Amino acid sequence: MRLILLGPPGSGKGTQAKRLVERYSIVQLSTGDMLRAAVAAQTPIGLKAKDIMAAGGLVPDEIVVGIISDRIDQPDAKNGFVLDGFPRTVRQAEELDELLRQKRMTLDAVIELRVNESALLQRVETRVAQMRARGEEVRADDTPEVLTNRLASYRAQTEPLIHYYSDRRKLSTVDGMMSIDEVTREIERMLAASAAPGKAAKKAGPARRSAKKAAGKGAKAKAGANKAAKNVAKKAARKPAKAAKRPAKSAKKAAKRGTGAAGKAAAVAKRAAKRRRKAAKKASRAARRPVSRSAAKGPRKLAKKLAKKRAKA
Ligand code: AMP
């Protein structure tokens, strides 16, 4: 199983990655953890990354791609891995595709944890306050100020990956605002559905619901095209055909009722036809009348009247 967890800082990628490691016997590859280890060990990479990380920026692509490439080759990653915090830019995603192609590996799924940004800031503020109260050391980049920068980096550089993977039909979106257990269940359900294509159609329901929920909770409703979104798109694609039929149907109905432009035109035509039928009937009746009789009858009546008048006079 090879997975990517996508989501802004604080969306719960690390927590869910650890659960996926247990569930599928794979390894968690967190570029953030690896970079922090490099900073602590003061390696050349660590020295380069230190200040960038402290400010909430992104470490250069070639550095993180190099780290990931080496890590994937380690024996413990043979059974699979969950990438947490990587890729973070479209270029990293393209390089990962190339890496996997060269290593003859495929990606099983990309799971986006969709969350509400203002709730994230609140979560960090609470966590920092609690850690300080316990006398624990707070990560240099885990403050509300740095988080604001990290969220900006996410929006500008990482969010385009949602389209990148949805275009490649790899993306599934989960409402990251649900409880940790609910998110885990939802991810497992999605992975089971994508592993068993026959069941995928049945499983699309809950997936759609959770994605909807995420959007409703204030998460940006960008094109997180998960399976549910694909279904919606399919429906939308079918709609124009129905819609095209609709005007014809309603025109027919309007014609029957005599309402609307089509109805009025039909009524006028109907009246004209009636008039034409009446005139034709009259003409045919007149044509059937014997001309000699009518012609003879008239003068005879007139002669009789004149004779009567004269007699009176
Ligand atoms: P994380 O623990 O995943 O939030 O990462 C902590 C910090 O490490 C980030 O704010 C970045 O400065 C750096 N970092 C981690 N992963 C990457 C990556 N894929 N690309 C660039 N920088 C990264």
Image (tube, rainbow, N blue to C red):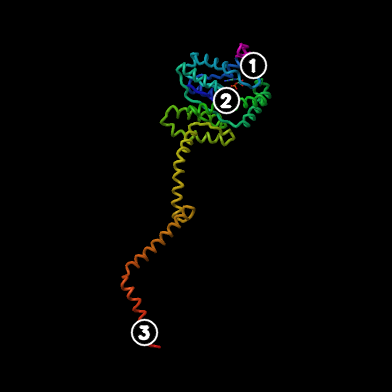
Q: Quadrant of residue 118?
A: top right
Q: Nearer the viewer, residue 45 or 258?
A: 258
Q: Which residue position is annotated with label 3? A: 307
Q: Position of residue 32 (x, y in %)?
A: 59, 19
150 w.r.t. 313: above or below: above
Residue drawn 39% across the image and 64% down it: 279
Q: Which residue position is annotated with label 2? A: 158
Magenta stretch contains residue 138: no
Q: Nearer the viewer, residue 169 or 203?
A: 169
Q: Which residue position is annotated with label 1? A: 50
User: Which SS type dominates the magenta stretch?
Assistant: helix
Q: Amino acid at mark 2?
A: Thr
Q: Is residue 84 visible?
A: no
Q: Amino acid at mark 3?
A: Ala
What residue range appears in magenta? 38-52
311 w.r.t. 156: above or below: below
Magenta stretch contains residue 48: yes
